[in-house]
Structures are given as structure tokens and as C-alpha cells.
Image: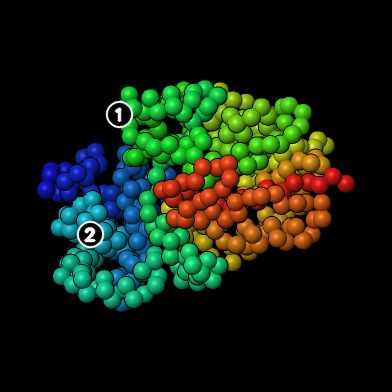
Amino acid sequence: MTSGLPGCRVKPGMTAPHQIPLWRQLQAVAKVLQAILGGASGTAAIGAVDASLRPGVQALSFTVLRTLGQAQALRRLLAPRPPAPPLDALLCSALALLSQGDEAAYDAFTLVNQTVEAAKKSPKLKAQAAFVNACLRRFLREQAALLAQVAQDPVARWNHPGWWLAQMQAEWPTQWQGILAANNAQAPMVLRVNTRRISVADYFKRLTAAGLLAEPLGPVGVVLQEATAVQHIPGFAEGLVSVQDSAAQWAAPLLLTGLRGQVPLQVLDACAAPGGKTAHLLEHADVSVTALDIDAQRCQRIHDNLQRLGLSARVLAADAADLPSWWQGQSYDAILLDAPCSGSGVVRRHPDIRWLRRPTDAAQLARQQARLLGVLWPLVKPGGRLLYCTCSVFQAEGQGQIKAFLDNNSNAALLPSPGHLLPGQAVQWPGLVDNPTREHDGFYYALLEKLAA
């Protein structure tokens, strides 16, 4: 073992956080987990963590969330009577981390020792420290048998809620296992090169000079071999690249390629924050973009991203479905509707989503998506296009939504579109380079053309 934190042993090749005791991180991880199980988003729960602890806590929390189904099943075997939420969160966090095997950042002795220490140093849990110690040491003694037992439970096996498993099996009977396996993997860091400022080939030279290994991914994408803080990515501050998953990089070319009209084309990005697709539209073609978002604070992120990239758009804080609040009577050559959705396609990047969503959410969100489609479609010029997309693998938010729309709009035609992009599945689409490594989020794309009267 190599030396790491005081009282901790970190496995060779693993990086110890900056001299912060592991017990403090475990306390924070348990609080994050408890908040998420109480309904808070992972972003909000992790954002509430002290800044000095946040990087390590986020990494540990993501590991816990990706194996929470198994951890909860183990806890039920070790402590059949449900503990109080703070104790339950600490136990489940420790069990999730202990179950990582060779992938664990810390050896088992350190994890048990520091979890017990976390209990001892918590006023609410110190009386339960011996109980925590007993549960975790029993797990270590009986680990193989306990893991074999919980492996019979589908929720523990796949680390998704039971209703989610059932829906995936019903909607994707031959692909569901690959989708769930991809959800449980760590997402790669993908960049989009701003080709208005630098070519992909020249940007690769910048990466090589910085000692960063990468591979090309699609027309303007780059996937880094190892994730890197944005402040250390060559050219990021200069606006040469943005961080964006490869599936999301399809939006701009799908909407704009081959679209005819008076230059600059008038484009509406209807649900634009944080501005990644807005920027890509401006990088891809000579367009004038109006970017809307209902959240004024998130609109500031659009401004910040555009400023970093040296781009400009008309940015409005408004509800796209509330036309009187923003619309001035103009029509658009193209509309990008990246609709609010369940986020079921980006679980690997946001592992809290699977534990936050409820079975009724997709249907409720589908109604909101249908409303946006109905309000925005009249704003498309004859011969113009609307690209509907969601980062979802639920069919109600994808092909089911568009089928209903086409059934009710005779002036709409579905142009060739990728449809559902499923995580872990290869993609083949004319004009868009296949991703042989299958490293893309789950997405849905439908390109609609307005027929002339």
C-alpha cells in the first residue's frame, strides 16, 4: 500500500484527496445520499458540500449511486430492521464502496475504520458506531455469500429501480441489458472543437503538446482518454473547445445541414441553457439565434458560454410555451426543441436520476413536451424545420411523442432521423460518423419539416 491520508491506506495507482481525512468525506457522502433519497437532485446535494471536500465527495457519491441497489440489498441482510435515515445512508455508502473489489479506491480495512470513525465523530451516530463496525466486519467475513445472495435480486444486480427495469425490458427487449450496463459505467469526457477558431487536426496538436491522449469522435468531437479539469484543457479558456457528449453534438448538423433560406438563417433554440447546443449552432453555420430558457440564472450560463467562445445570440429568460411573454410575431427557418425530459439517457453522467425518477414522471413530462411542440410548430416557416430531441430512452418521450404529433399535424413530415440513440449501442447514420466505441449518451432525435400549404 502507498501512504495517503492520515489513518488511510490508498491502493497503488489511486490518488488520495488533498490530505482530507476519509471519515469527513464519508460523512459528507452519507449526507448527499440521504438528501437524494429525500428527493434532492445530486447537483444540489453535492453543491451544498464544503468546496474543499467537494471533488472527493462527488467521486465517492457517484460510485455509491451507481451501486446503490446492491448496497441497499446488502444492508437489508445485515440490518433487517431499517435504521434511521442518517445511519442507513452511512451504512449503504460504506457497503457500496466496499463492494467495488479491485476497483475500490481504498482498501477494506481503511474503509471500515474510517466509516466507524465517521459514526463516532457524528453527534447523531456516535452511539451506533459499534453497530456500524459489526455490520461492516460481518460483510467482510461473509462477503462472497452475501454478494451471491443479493445477486438474485434484479434491483441489486442492475442497480436501477424495479419499475425502471420493467420499462426497459418492455420497451427494449433485446437491448435493455446493454442500456443498463452503459448506465452503470463512467462516462468519458468528450470535447467539441470550435472549428470557427481551430481545425480538429490542429487541436489534436495542442493536446499532444500538453501530453493528453485523445481520439477523434465524429466530425468535430474529441474523446479524452482520461477526464481532465476544464482549467487544464488546452484552449478551453480561449474558446477553442467545449465539453459536450457526442450524442448532443448531432443536434446542430441534423437541424441545419441542407437547410435553405436567406442567410443568416433565423433559428430559435427553445430550451437553450446551459448553451452548448446554442453555441454549436453558431459554430456550424451562419445563423442568427434566439435562445430561450425559463430560468434567468441558467440564461447567465448561456451568456458565459457564448462569451468564452466568442459568439453572440439573442438570449431571453422566458417560457417558450408562453408566447405573449417573448414572441414578437416572427417565424423561423429552424427551431431546436431540446425538450425538458426525464434525463433517462444521461444516467451515467447523473447517476442520481434513476433514484429520483418515479414511474409517472415520463407521462407527465410527455404532456409538457407535447405542449411545447404544439405552441412552437406554428412558428416554423413553410419549408422550415423543427428538431425535437430529448436525452431520454423512454419511448413516451421519443417515438411515442412524435407519432402522436404527426397523427395530429397534417402539415408536418418526418425527415430521415436517427430516432432513439441507446447508450451502449453502436450508431450508424448517413453523414454522421459512427462511434465504434459506443461512447454516447441516450438521446432521441426527430427532424420535422413543415410542408407548404
Of residue 288 and residue 34, the one placed in the foreground of this image is: 288
Which residue type does callout 1 highlight? Gly
Q: Name the residue under label 2.
A: 101
Q: Which mark is residue 114?
A: none
x and y, in percent, of residue 45 in the image: 43, 50
x and y, in percent, of residue 352 in the image: 44, 56
Of residue 237 and residue 202, the one placed in the foreground of this image is: 202
Q: Can residue 20 be seen in this view?
A: yes
Helix, strand or loop at label 1? It is loop
Q: In which quarter of the image is residue 399?
A: bottom right
Q: Name the residue under label 1.
A: 211
Name the residue: 47% across, 65% down: 176
Name the residue: 49% across, 25% down: 199
Name the residue: 60% across, 51% down: 418
298 lies left or right of 12? right
Helix, strand or loop at label 2? It is helix
Q: Quadrant of residue 90?
A: bottom left
126 lies left or right of 215? left
Figure check: 97 above or below 271: below
Name the residue: 18% across, 58% down: 108
Mark nearer the N terminus (1 vs 2): 2
